[in-house]
């Protein structure tokens, strides 16, 4: 069995030495016990980094036969970098594991994933069973996000990020999904092949800073919701009916007051109504606009990533 470990990198110069060390030890151990082929690889994907990430992983590649590298022409985002690595690695590997470079996902779960794969599972999810290293705010917002996605009918694996193993067949099916708006956590469960879970405790980031600040987390959540559910559009219709009912109620209330002679002229109620309805309309237009924007991006069919250098393919040519 030939295994590939795909590691997307964006400005990870501080953590890379430890990442290479730990992943190399894990892979070497699996090769020693004959669980995987000696041709197995760790593939670092440089997602348009502006620091020394590319020079570091290039050096590691020249010094260590286990390590190979891919360089994207610019920053395509975490999901694009993962897809680039999966596209290249799945051509010659029996299974591909994706993991972030920050070492928050426990690399010691990788042998367990390999065992699950050898037992017949084509998708193995790494699931965090302990998020104590995350801030209380991040834990709470993550829980709200997973609950919201469940309500909206989107099938996700709770507390599972992009740390997973996929067979070559699973990768091929995944790559047949042609969405420009990538949300792999939602797409992978749609594959439907036999799957299992491996549980682990998330660690603190080894070094460097998070590449998912609050702004990016919110955008990621919005992308996930709008890429997989049209419930928000349906909620707009429900909101419209609710406003109509409220308007009818206010009309009846006003007529009653008029007949009773208790009408007090003033502009406060009118202004409040105008501001409230104006705000609702803007929210509704924004939600619709989010979906229209996604349609706009999809129909252009632009490449989801562009590879500038791929040393893995060069190695294949030499073989």
Image (tube, helix red, strand yellow):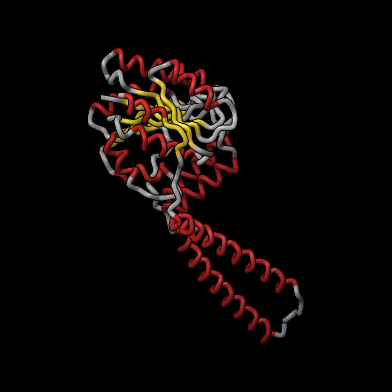
Figure quadrant of residue 311: top left
**Left or right position of 319 against 256:** left
232 versus 43 height, above or below: below
**Residue drawn at 40 percent across, 15 percent down:** 25
* Image location (x, y in percent) of residue 119: 23, 28
Instruction: List x then y, in percent, for residue 233.
Output: 47, 62
The quarter of the rendered structure image containing the C terminus is top left
Q: Quadrant of residue 187?
A: top left
Q: Is residue 29 above or below residue 78?
A: above
Q: Give the number of callouts.
A: 0
The answer to whether residue 153 of the structure is visible from this angle is yes
71, above or below 148, in the image? above
171 above or below 319? below
Instruction: Please identify the quadrant where the N terminus is shown.
Output: top left
> Residue at position x 32%, y 38% from top?
171
Residue sitting at x 47%, y 36%: 308
């Amino acid at each position: 069995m030939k295994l590939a470990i795909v590691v997307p990198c964006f400005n990870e110069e501080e953590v890379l030495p430890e990442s290479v060390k730990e992943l190399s030890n894990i892979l070497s151990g699996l090769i020693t016990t004959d669980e995987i082929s000696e041709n197995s690889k760790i593939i670092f994907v440089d997602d348009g980094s502006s620091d020394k990430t590319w020079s570091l992983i290039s050096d590691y590649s020249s010094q260590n036969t286990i390590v190979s590298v891919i360089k994207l022409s610019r920053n395509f985002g975490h999901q694009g970098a993962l897809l680039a690595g999966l596209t290249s690695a799945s051509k010659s590997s029996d299974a591909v594991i994706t993991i972030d470079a920050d070492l928050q996902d426990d690399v010691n779960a990788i042998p367990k994933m390999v065992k699950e794969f050898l037992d017949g599972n084509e998708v193995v999810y790494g699931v965090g069973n302990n998020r104590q290293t995350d801030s209380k705010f991040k834990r709470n917002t993550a829980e709200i996000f997973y609950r919201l996605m469940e309500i909206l009918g989107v099938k996700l694996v709770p507390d599972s990020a992009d740390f997973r193993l996929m067979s070559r067949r699973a990768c091929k099916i995944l790559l047949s999904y042609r969405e420009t708006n990538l949300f792999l956590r939602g797409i992978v469960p749609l594959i439907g092949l036999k799957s299992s879970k491996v549980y682990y405790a998330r660690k603190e980031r080894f070094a460097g800073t998070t590449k998912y600040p609050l702004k990016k987390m919110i955008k990621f959540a919005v992308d996930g919701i709008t890429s997989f559910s049209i419930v928000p559009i349906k909620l707009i219709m429900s909101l419209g009916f609710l406003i109509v009912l409220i308007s009818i109620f206010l009309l009846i209330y006003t007529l009653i007051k008029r007949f009773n002679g208790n009408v007090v002229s003033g502009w406060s109620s009118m202004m409040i109504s105008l501001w409230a309805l104006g705000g609702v309309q803007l929210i509704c237009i924004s939600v619709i606009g989010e979906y229209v924007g996604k349609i706009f991006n999809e129909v252009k069919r632009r490449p989801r990533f562009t590879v500038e250098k791929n040393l893995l393919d060069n190695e294949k040519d030499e073989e």
